[in-house]
Image (tube, rainbow, N blue to C red):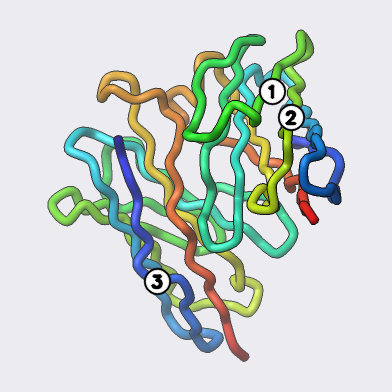
């Protein structure tokens, strides 16, 4: 069974540009989560999508947005890139709709490393 | 809102020695607790979790953790580490809806375990 897949693996952009990151969840998973992992800051929750809807959002500005497609894959868009957006962006999925449910577990992809110059 | 503190940013240890990685959480209600591991250039993988029941939780790769409600701690231990255990370890906490949460985990900043030969 394929795990969570993310693309691209690496992405280099310049300030002011837009970045689009993509994620395919484990087959059968309907919830997708996005986290930002900046150096020394751990994982910061960005967005949660479930059944095509945005269910929850972390403390990030509106230039961080995304969507979930009918096949449950998701993309994260970051507009007007700033230097501090350089980070590893991790996507995760969970096996129950409505959130991680009573298993609590998220399944992570290997991440997309965004570098803003 | 819940929060997690990992008290050590880096823990160096020699191979075959025991190790303890410390984690404290802040919440006045029932929580779920997790330890994830991130090997270099990979996503996060669940080591173990506490949802309810026995306070001593055993996970993969010989790791275990003990939930201590009075001290609001969930420290991770291994009696004898290997070189291959060198990785970043993240403690996480989530609140089930019954406690006012949405199951989405909040992560600590991580502890880098460095095992020396």
Label 2: element kind: strand
What residue is drawn where x is 70% and y is 18%? Answer: A67
Q: Pointers 1 and 2 in contact (CB under 8 A)?
A: yes
Residue receiving disc 3: B8
Any part of residue B66 in sight? no
Real-space Cα separation, disc 3 to disc 1, in angstroms? 34 Å
The image shows residue B16 at horizontal and vertical percentages of 52, 84
User: Dot 1, how many residues are within 10 Å of its Cα: few (below 14), some (14-19), or many (20+)?
Assistant: some
Residue receiving disc 2: A77
The image shows residue B110 at horizontal and vertical percentages of 49, 61
The image shows residue A99 at horizontal and vertical percentages of 50, 21
The image shows residue B77, relative to residue A88, as above or below, that is below
Real-space Cα separation, disc 3 to disc 2, in angstroms? 33 Å
The image shows residue A80, relative to residue B9, as above or below, that is above
Label 1: element kind: strand
Q: Quadrant of the C terminus of chain B?
A: bottom right
């Amino acid at each position: 069974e394929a795990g969570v897949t993310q693309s691209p693996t690496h992405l280099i952009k310049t300030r002011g540009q837009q970045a689009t990151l993509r994620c395919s969840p484990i087959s059968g998973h309907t919830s997708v989560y996005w986290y930002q992992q900046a150096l020394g800051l751990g994982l910061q929750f960005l967005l949660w999508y479930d059944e095509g809807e945005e269910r929850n959002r972390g403390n990030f500005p509106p230039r961080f947005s995304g969507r979930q497609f009918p096949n449950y894959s998701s993309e994260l868009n970051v507009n007007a890139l700033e230097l501090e957006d350089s980070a590893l962006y991790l996507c995760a999925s969970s096996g129950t709709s409505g959130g991680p449910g009573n298993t609590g577990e998220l399944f992570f992809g290997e991440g997309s490393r965004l570098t803003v110059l | 809102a819940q929060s997690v503190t990992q008290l050590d940013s880096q823990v160096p240890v020699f191979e075959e020695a025991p190790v303890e990685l410390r984690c404290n959480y802040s919440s006045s209600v029932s929580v779920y607790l997790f330890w994830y591991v991130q090997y270099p250039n990979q996503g996060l993988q669940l080591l173990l979790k506490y949802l309810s029941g026995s306070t001593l939780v055993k996970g993969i790769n010989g790791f275990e953790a003990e939930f201590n409600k009075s001290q609001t701690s969930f420290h991770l231990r291994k009696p004898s580490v290997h070189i291959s255990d060198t990785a970043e370890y993240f403690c996480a906490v989530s609140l089930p809806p019954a406690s006012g949460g949405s199951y989405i985990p909040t992560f600590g900043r991580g502890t880098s375990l460095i095992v020396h030969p």
